[in-house]
Amino acid sequence: MTYLSLQDGIYQALIGSTVFHAIAEALELASSEGHTITFQFNEVTVTVAHDSDANLIYRDWDRAMNGYIDKNVGPYPKPVLTDEEVASDARIEAENQLRRQVQYDEQQAKEQAQRQQVDSILADAPTIELSDEKTWREFKAKNRDCYGAGVIAYAQRWARLMQVEIAAGKKLEDIAEDTSFLADTDGITGFMYGCAVTTLAQCWKHGEQLRRWHNHDTQMGTEGDEANENGGVLNPAVIILSKKD
């Protein structure tokens, strides 16, 4: 199996490969072609010779990934790091951990604020307005595991948030996207989003309007218009479920 592809004079790791795969293949290429091989993996440039030490190449690739050293590695990393290098790596890693903790805390606070906002909006809001209560009950009965229950909970929150906006005189097409993000208080996947659209399309009072909006909003060509005519729901894999600040 091939893990590297030559592009513009430098090898690129293929999707699905690991850095171990890439290093091993680069070593084989260097041996068979009689010269060093350079490849990029996660924005780190790695050069290996036929006699490079794979373990040391990986060690310095990992150091580069963590920002301990620059983004160029090999072909002959030093076998033993100096005390100064070890201390520098430890200092940078401590800084990395502190930064990750700050980012984690900020994200947790943001998610908590979002949950509180949704709870506040829905505190006195009507329950979901169903067009097909029997099918809704069947969906709920068949989706009692964590994943399925997550879809049902998300669909219900989203529908109720849209109902609030529609009751205030807004058009579904103008508020569906923003409310879809607001309703995502648990971190849903693209597949879960698609299941929610499909479920609401069948059960919710405004489901057909939502289905048609989703298909048109998602399409990259005319496939959404075609789905609207045949009653389908487009593949949610192309949906982006988080907005950049």
Image: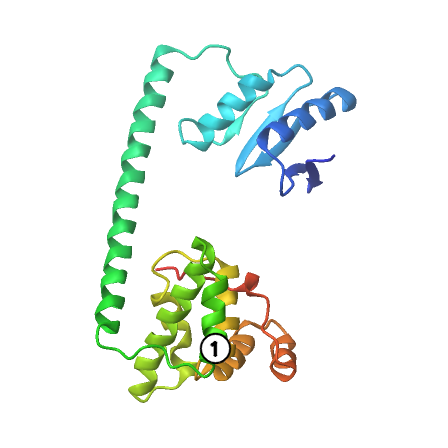
Q: Residue at x 60, y 77 (%)?
A: 224
Q: Residue at x 48, y 77 (%)?
A: 134
Residue 22 falls left or right of residue 103: right
What residue sits right under mark 1 in the picture? 134
Type of the residue with mark 1: Lys
Question: In terms of image quadrants, where is residue 178?
Answer: bottom left
Residue 32 falls left or right of residue 183: right
Residue 27 falls left or right of residue 219: right
Q: At which x and y percent is residue 200?
A: 47, 75
Q: Image quadrant for the N terminus?
A: top right
Q: Which of the colour schemes (rainbow, by chain, secondary structure, one colour) is used? A: rainbow
Q: Residue at x 32, y 89 (%)?
A: 169
Question: Regarding mark 1 in the picture, which secondary structure is present there?
Answer: helix
**Which one is nearer the viewer's eye here, 20 or 190?**
190
Q: At which x and y percent is residue 110?
A: 26, 56
Establish if 4 lies above or below 209.
above
